[in-house]
Image (tube, helix red, strand yellow):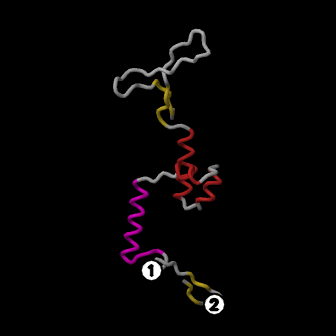
Amino acid sequence: MLTTLVAKIDAVTGETLYAKPRADRKRPARKAKMEYRGLTFHDLRRSAAVRNLVRGQVPERIAMQISGHKTRAVFDRYNIVSENDIMDAGRKLSEFHNGQPKNGDNSGTILHHDAAVDSTIN
């Protein structure tokens, strides 16, 4: 089971928290507040539809259309940057400064070769 529904516990007292009784009931029952523990379907949507698409180098605009996110703000909320992402960016920056960029030169400009005129364009 990916998710379980458990009673919410007060972090300070350790006691079960209860929801406010509904005003429209004659004799409302006392019900514990509930919370999900574990993965939900929404968690899986986030990791599969956003993180994997972005990490797979799918353009973000296309990833937004696939995942159904209409605004950039919501898309960015689910495009969570992990510690590994930051370390990977640092490694790429280090390679660049050590003179080993994968594309282009050390100026930061990617060079494009135009086969029609057989020249290099910046």
- Of residues 17 and 115, which is closer to you in this image? 17
In this view, the residue farthest toward the front is: 23
Q: Nearer the viewer, mark 1 or mark 2?
A: 1
Query: Does 97 appear in magenta?
Result: yes
Disc number for residue 44:
none
Could you tell me what secondary structure mostly forms the magenta stretch? helix
- Name the image quarter holding residue 65: bottom right
The x and y percentages for residue 76 are: 53, 53
- Where is residue 122? Give x, y as percent: 54, 83
- Does residue 84 lie above or below 6 as drawn? below
Does residue 76 belong to the magenta stretch? no
Say few, some or many: other residues with alpha carbon within 10 Å of mark 2 (under 14 / 14 to 19 / 20 or more): few
Image height of 59 relative to 2, above or below:
below
Q: CA distance from mark 1 to mark 2?
A: 23 Å
Q: Which residues are magenta?
A: 83-102
Instruction: Answer with left or right where residue 15 lies relative to residue 70.
Output: left
Q: Quadrant of residue 83?
A: bottom left
Q: Residues within 10 Å of mark 1 (few under 14, many from 20)?
A: few
Q: Which residue is mark 2?
A: 117
Viewer-side residue, 13 vs 99: 13
The residue sitting at 49% across, 31% down in the picture is: 36
Residue located beneath label 1 in the image: 107
Q: Please, what secondary structure does the residue beneath circle 2 have?
A: loop
Residue drawn 55% across the image and 49% down it? 48
